[in-house]
Image: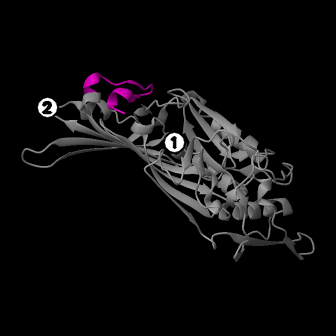
Amino acid sequence: MSFKDLSLLAGSPIPEPVAPDVMDALERVEIATAIGERGSFRLTFRLGPGSTLPARFLHQTGELVRVVLVTPVSGDPGVAMDGVMVAHTVSTGGRGRTRTLVVAGEDLTLLMDLIDATGRPLPGMPTAARIQLILAGYSSMGVVPQVVPPPLEDVPVPADRIFHQQGTDYAYVRSLAARVGHRFTLDPGPLPGASVAYWGPEPHGDRSRPSLVVNFDKLANVEELRLRFNAVHRVDPEAIILDPVSKTPIPIPVPDISTLVVPLGAVVPPAQRRWRLHQVAKLTPLQAAGALLAEASRSAEAMTGLGRLDVRRRGRRLRVGGLVEVRAASKPFEGLFAISRAYDTITARSHHQEFELLRAGIGAASARSTS
């Protein structure tokens, strides 16, 4: 992939295609994304004598400049990042050396993390409704919520308890996700200027259509792939609550992790460690069960992978949240994996992507069990 296949849009408040001379000065693009985390990008430009490029991005008003990066490849509309510029760095190597401008930024969740809204009342609203309400405030930026209600939840009547937001919108949305085993990720696209704000269990990709199929014996689709299983990663959590009247301790059983999402692997091995959840004594039985489910499901993700892909040669770019199918490895390592992280490095001559894989379970699950 060359920069002829890369589109850079920038502007405030509406991003627009940059001028040809800006693309000519672009030397390197780096994009980092991960499930449940804020994405980031880094643009490196070459500066000639008297270049006005820094002033085009760093306005005297100091306003935030929105950036959209589009890298279309086969089967992918190509919006790889939608964010805002944060740090601008101009540097020179000294006598006769090239001057550079490096612009670093973060995805649009940064804008959800700028204002502390602690204390905002959210009376009588289940978790999914609170998430929908908060994310609706960002519709003007093209953000479309996709919210999956948690499987275990009780909602007290407003007379008993009124929920109040704690922290920024981003911090609060993430904290609610962590309590129930969900993750919150802003996925750019499918069109420039649009994003899908996904709040729900992972993985959520289409299991019948993996983004990539890798033959472990003949790595034709990737440059390298390393898979690993950690036998002591999984935890058997415990929770004890107190009856509000009698103060009698009540142990809460751990729900089956498939209540949250069906594991990608065929068999989830038993936990080798036991862990007591703290500060749960005043929770309701359903709230405690939700906390147990979150801990159990997250710790079950004990099989991981690291790989590297030549996007230009293979004509395919992996997206976080998608799935990869591994074949012809030893049986414990075969089957579907979720793409948990991706790091793109793009120059005029190459486009490489390093990626991380994740799943709960050993071996390939049958099509019926993963549907």
Spot the residue most to the left. Answer: 95
**Dot 2, how many residues are within 10 Å of its Cα: few (below 14), some (14-19), or many (20+)?**
few
Q: Which amino acid type is shown beneath numbered disc 2?
A: Gly
Residue 30 picture location, percent across and down: 38, 44
- Residue at 7% over, 44% down: 96
Q: Please, what secondary structure does the residue beneath circle 2 have?
A: loop
Q: Is residue 36 visible?
A: no
Tell me if residue 72 comes above or below residue 292 in the rendering. Answer: above
Residue 193 x, y percent position in the rendering: 51, 28
Read off the residue under disc 2. 50
User: Cα distance, mark 2 to mark 1?
Assistant: 39 Å
Q: Based on the displayed image, in which of its 4 quarters is residue 344 positioned? A: top left
Query: Residue at 76% of width from left, 64% of height from top?
Result: 292
In this picture, is 33 found above or below 298?
Answer: above
Element carrying mark 1 = loop
Q: Which residues are magenta?
A: 1-22
Residue 158 seen: yes
Q: Nearer the viewer, mark 2 or mark 1?
A: 1
The residue that label 1 is drawn on is: 318
The foreground one among 337 and 261 is 337
